[in-house]
Amino acid sequence: MYTFSSKLKTLSLALMVIGLLGVGYGFLSAPASVDEVKVLLQESHNAHGEVATTDGQTVAESSNAVQSEEAHAAHVYHLLKNKPWSSLYVALFFFFMISLGTLAFYAIQHASQAGWSIVLFRVMEGITAYLPVGGILLFVFFVLSAAHMNHLFVWMDPEVVANDALIQNKAGYLNVPFFLVRAAIYILGWILYRNYARKMTLKQDASSDLSNYRKLFKSSAAFLVFFLVTESMMSWDWIMSLDPHWYSTLFGWYVFSGLIVSAITTIALVAIYLKGNGYLEFVNDSHLHDLAKYMFGFSIFWAYLWFSQFMLIWYANIPEEVTYFVSRFNEYKVPFLGMVVLNFVFPLLILMNSDYKRVPWFIVTAGIVVLIGHYIDVFVMIMPATVGDQWFIGISEISSVLLVLGIFIYVVFNALTKAPLLAKGNPFIKESEHFHY
C-alpha cells in the first residue's frame, strides 16, 4: 500500500495556501473603477512619453476624443477585472483536462483489453480521483459566471446579446440554463463512469470469476462513445464560446489532442515518482518506454491538428475565422509560437530516440516541458477572448496554478493510499508484469 509522505502532503498544502493568498491578492488588486483605470492609462502614457493635446481641435473633435478615451478606459476596466478570473479558469481547466484525459486513456485500455498497461491502472485511477473535485470547482465557476460575477462569457450578458445579431442566432444553444445543464451532464457522466470503473476493478481483485472484468469492458466501450460526443461539445461550450463569433470544426479534436498528451505525461511523471520512492516495482523500463512513445505520438498528433486548423483558416481568409489567429499573432506572439516549440519541436527532437524513452530523468524533463507547453496552449486559447491585450504572467496566473496544483497533488496522492497499487484481479496481469518491448 502506498503511504502519502508527510513532505509531499506539506508541499501540497503549502501550494494551496500560497496559491490562495496570491489569487486573493489578484482579485483585490484589480481596478475598482473606470477612474482608476484612467489613472493607470495616463501613467502608462507618461512612461512612454505620450502627451495628449487638444491644440487646433474643434469642439466636436475634442468631444469625440474624450468619448473615445472614456470608451477605451471602460473597455480596459472590464478586461482587467476579467484577468484574475481568467487566470483561475485557465488553471482549473488545465488540471481538469489532465484528469479527464487520463480517464479517456484508462477507458481505452479496458475497451481494447490492453495487457501492457494494467500495472499502471491504479496510477490512472489516482489521477482520475481529481475529476469529481475539479468538476465541482468548474461547475461553481460557471454558476458564478452565469451570476455575472465575471464577464468571461460575453453571450451571458443580455446587453451584449441585445446588440449582437450573430449571438442572437445562437441563443437557442448559447443560453445560461442550457449551458449549465450540459455542463452538469458532461461532468456527471464522466464522474459516474470513473466511480463505476474504480468499483469494478476493486471488486475484480477479490473475485474468482471474470464477471466484473466483462462488465467493465462493455461499459468502457459505451463510455468512449459518450466521451467523444461530450468532449467535443465541452470544447465548444467551455472554450470556443468565449469568443462566440469564432468557430472551427477541428476544435474538439484539437482540445482532445492536448488533454490526452497532458494526461499521458502526467501518468508517466506520477509512475516515475512512485517508482523512485520504492513503489511500483512491477513497472519496468518497457512500460515507461511505451508511455514516452504515446507522449511522442500524441505530440505529433497535436501538431498535425494545430497546423491543419491554422493552415485551413489562414488560406481561406474568412474574417469570422481568421480573427482568431490575427489577435494571437498581434498580441500573443511569444506564447502562441513558443508553445508550438514546446509542444512539437521539443518532443520531436528529444523523444524520437528510442533509448531516451527508457531513461526516467529524461522522461521527467521532457514531461515537465510538455506540460508547461500545454498550459500555455490553454492560456492562449482562453486569454485573448477574455482579457485581450491586457495580459501578462503575474501573481494571478502563477498563484492560480499553485493553488490548483496543490489541490491536484493532494487529491491524487491521497487517492493512491486507498487501494493496493497493483490491480491483481485483471486476467492479463501476468502479461503486464512481464511486459518487454
Image: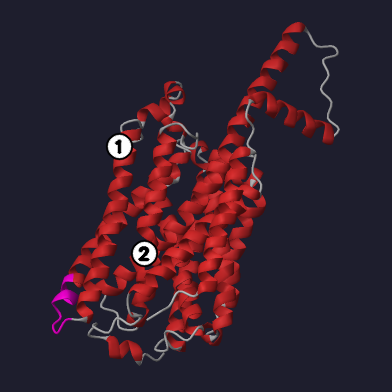
Q: Secondary structure at mark 2?
A: loop
Foreground mark, 2 or 1, reads 2
- Residue 342 % position (x, y): 60, 65
Which residue lies under the disc numbered 2?
129
Q: Are marks 2 and 1 in contact (CB under 8 Å)?
A: no
In the image, which disc is placed on residue 178? 1
**289 part of magenta stretch:** no
Residue that appears at 54% across and 67% down: 10
- Callout 1, which amino acid? Phe
Q: Is residue 235 visible?
A: no
Location of residue 82 (image quadrant): top right
Q: What range is drawn magenta here?
A: 207-215
In the image, residue 59 above or below residue 75: above
- Residue 37 % position (x, y): 68, 29
Residue that appears at 43% across and 57% down: 96
Label 2 crowd (10 A; few <14 / some 14-19 / many >=20): many
